[in-house]
Image (spheres, grey):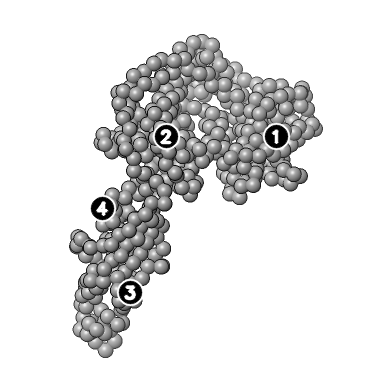
Amino acid sequence: MAQDLEATAADEADDDAPEQGAPEQMDLEVSISSPSACQRHVEVTIPRPIVDRYLDNAFGEMMDTAQVPGFRVGHAPRKLIEVRFRKEVAEQVKGTLLMDAMAQVNEDHDLTAISEPDLDLDAVTVPDDGPMQFAFDLEVRPEFEMPNWKGLKIERPTADFGDDEVDRQLRSVLARYGRLTPSEEPAAADDFVVVNVRATHDGKTLADANEQSLRVRPTLSFFDGKLEKFDQLMIGAKPGDKKTGKVELSKDAASEELKGKSVDVEFEVLEIKKLELPELNEAFLQQMGNFETEADLRDAIKDNLERQLEYRRQQSARQQITQLLTEAAEWELPPELLRRQSERELQRSVLELQRSGFSDEDIRAHENELRQNSATATARALREHFILERIAEDQDVEAEPGDYDREVALIAMQSGESPRRVRAQLEKRGMMDSLRNQIIERKVIELVEAEAKFKDVPLEEDSGEVETIALAAGGSQQEIPEATKPDEPKELAAPKEHD
């Protein structure tokens, strides 16, 4: 997450700026204020003698190549060259001075940036007389005393997955390959209802979506809120019925005026569908993953449950560890920083779930949960990251090439795609940095765990009774990409919304 000011300033400098050797140390006047723990306002003054030295060097390098009408190349008087090329040389020198000055400020004052500097380049000029001045704002990792992370007392969830749990998971797996058939019967729990959805507040339509296929479950999760007792609302419904409920919007909903309020949601029932599970025969076992017997499939399901248990252990340990480490870390985090980092935290969480064997359905429910509490979740994740990153630096924890290969292989295993394709997708979407953070943070958690004292406790069951819909009930000024449902059952006849 951290990045050097030097690299950022280099990107901002003009590509044609004259190359110079290692810059001499400058006697800069630097004033740094801290509006908050993660913000710095930096004002820099470059004395006139330094500005003149940079200008002199730039014009000196131009003498042999300057083309001036009436003179051979390289033979025009210096004064004439300075007058003729003053503007473009000043722009080149501005870029070089900014790059060198910001690099020195970064080195002298140890500013650990977590974003690019907010610098108005157009407002910076190289004056004809007097010093050159510029200012920029910067988000930085906060300064804090390192908490003691050795010998923490941590509870560790444990579970023994017997036949009953494997049976439950097997039914869930079969459901992904099931087929939906139209039914004349009223809707029952776990049936699918095809509905038109419309969200309103004070009679004004906020959002709508047509022909949504939703499973009848206790909770319906929108991007920005939840409708509880969705199953009770839909059980007994028939085509033509209209059912209404209320969605409690989260405090992080996109609509400013509706945050934390409730909106009305109407469901127009179009069709009821029953789920038919596939027959667990030889052909289906081959389709599932070249399993020879049902026992092989059950073993694979149990292995996946173990992976999910390991994820829950890691998450539980992470939550306990970071809670203990961040007890005094109540830094004020700028809202703009939280907004920018919320998508990064969502990406990191999704990658973690993908590599841990969770279904697309589980991941979508987790995504909506994060969206509904984005500010809180992001603030917590940032505080955790700052402390874990400090431990990583102190203990020389790095992400190795093999670490990336293992993470990509686990994600590929869950998605059914090749590791090469998964890596290409991650790189294209700019998610390799999120993957790096995930690797580093997991390694640090393992390091802390190695020094911790554990107490085993039973794993709390995850009901998984959440259905998701790709819709913001409160409406949104921003377009939210629709979540796909690749693991949803297929139609038996006249498929519409299912492949």
- Nearer the observer: mark 2 or 3; the answer is 3
Image height of 177 relative to 29, above or below: above
Tell me the crowding category of disc 3: few under 14, some 14 to 19, or many 20 or more residues within 10 angstroms, Cα based.
few
Q: Which is nearer the eye, 177 or 256? A: 256
Tell me the crowding category of disc 2: few under 14, some 14 to 19, or many 20 or more residues within 10 angstroms, Cα based.
some
Gap in angstroms between the C-alphas marked 4 and 2: 43 Å
Which comes sooner in the sequence, label 2 or label 3?
3
Question: Which residue is painted at 22% across and 62% down in the image?
Answer: 26
- Nearer the observer: mark 4 or 2; the answer is 4
Q: Residue 381 carries which label?
A: none
Which comes sooner in the sequence, label 3 or label 1?
3
Query: Residue 356: which quarter of the image?
Result: top left
**Badge 1 amino acid:** Lys
Q: Which is nearer the eye, 206 or 412? A: 206
Residue that label 4 marks: 107
**Badge 2 amino acid:** Ser
**Badge 4 amino acid:** Glu
Q: Position of residue 31 (x, y in %)?
A: 32, 58
Q: Which is nearer the eye, 154 or 180? A: 154
Q: What element carries label 1?
A: strand
Residue that label 2 marks: 418
Is any atom of residue 162 visible in this view?
A: yes
Q: Which mark is residue 246?
A: 1
Tell me the crowding category of disc 1: few under 14, some 14 to 19, or many 20 or more residues within 10 angstroms, Cα based.
some
Which quadrant: the C terminus?
top right
Gap in angstroms between the C-alphas marked 2 and 3: 57 Å
Q: Which mark is residue 127?
A: 3
Residue most extreme to the right = 240
Relative to 85, is 331 on the left or the right?
Answer: right
Is any atom of residue 180 visible in this view?
A: no
Q: What element carries label 2?
A: loop
The answer to whether the residue labelled 3 contacts the one labelled 1, judged by CB atoms less than 8 Å apart, is no
